[in-house]
Image (cartoon, rainbow, N blue to C red):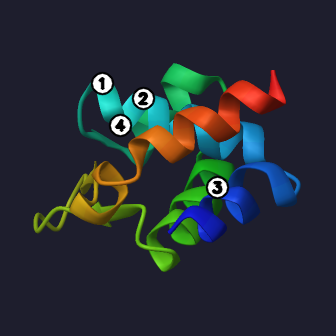
């Protein structure tokens, strides 16, 4: 997971937005529309980043069909300190 976080946050373009999404979801679950509004970015941009984060087991979808909420995974929760360390080094 730590390698995936380095890749997602520090290793590729868009890492800052992915880190912001993770921080928002750490506060409370949100859907893509809510995240776009909170972060001031386009809905499609948020969807793109959510797909990447989901692919790497950082976030997961809830089971509702409309307005799906996204949650941080238990796997990510176990590596939250690594996420904080990575983001601290980038600031």
Q: Secondary structure at mark 1?
A: helix
- Left of 84 or right of it: where is 86? right
Asked if the residue at tag 4 contacts the one at tag 3, i.e. Cβ–Cβ closer than 8 Å, the answer is: no
Residue under circle 4?
25
Q: Residues within 10 Å of mark 4 (few under 14, many from 20)?
A: some
Front-most of 53 and 39?
A: 53
**N-term mark: 2 or 3:** 2
Residue at the (22%, 60%) spot, across then down: 74
- Left of 44 or right of it: where is 63? left
Which label is found at residue 24? Answer: 2
Which label is found at residue 82? Answer: none
Q: Secondary structure at mark 4?
A: helix
Residue under circle 1?
27
Residue at the (75%, 47%) spot, across then down: 15
Asked if the residue at tag 1 contacts the one at tag 2, i.e. Cβ–Cβ closer than 8 Å, the answer is: yes
Count of numbered marks: 4
Residues at marks 3 and 4, CA–CA distance in whole angstroms: 17 Å
Residue 8 visible in this rendered orientation of the protein: yes
Residues at marks 2 and 3, CA–CA distance in whole angstroms: 17 Å
Which label is found at residue 44? Answer: 3
Q: Secondary structure at mark 2?
A: helix
Front-most of 8 and 2?
A: 2
Asked if the residue at tag 4 contacts the one at tag 2, i.e. Cβ–Cβ closer than 8 Å, the answer is: yes
**N-term mark: 1 or 3:** 1
Quarter of the image for the C terminus: give it.
top right
């Amino acid at each position: 997971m730590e390698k995936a976080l380095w890749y997602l946050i520090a290793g590729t373009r868009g890492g800052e937005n992915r880190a912001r999404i993770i921080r928002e979801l750490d506060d409370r679950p949100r859907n893509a529309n809510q995240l776009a509004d909170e972060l001031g970015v386009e809905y499609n941009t948020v969807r793109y980043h959510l797909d990447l984060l989901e692919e790497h087991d950082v976030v997961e979808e809830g089971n509702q069909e409309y307005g799906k909420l996204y949650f941080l995974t238990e796997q990510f929760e176990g590596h939250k300190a690594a996420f904080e360390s990575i983001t601290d080094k980038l600031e």
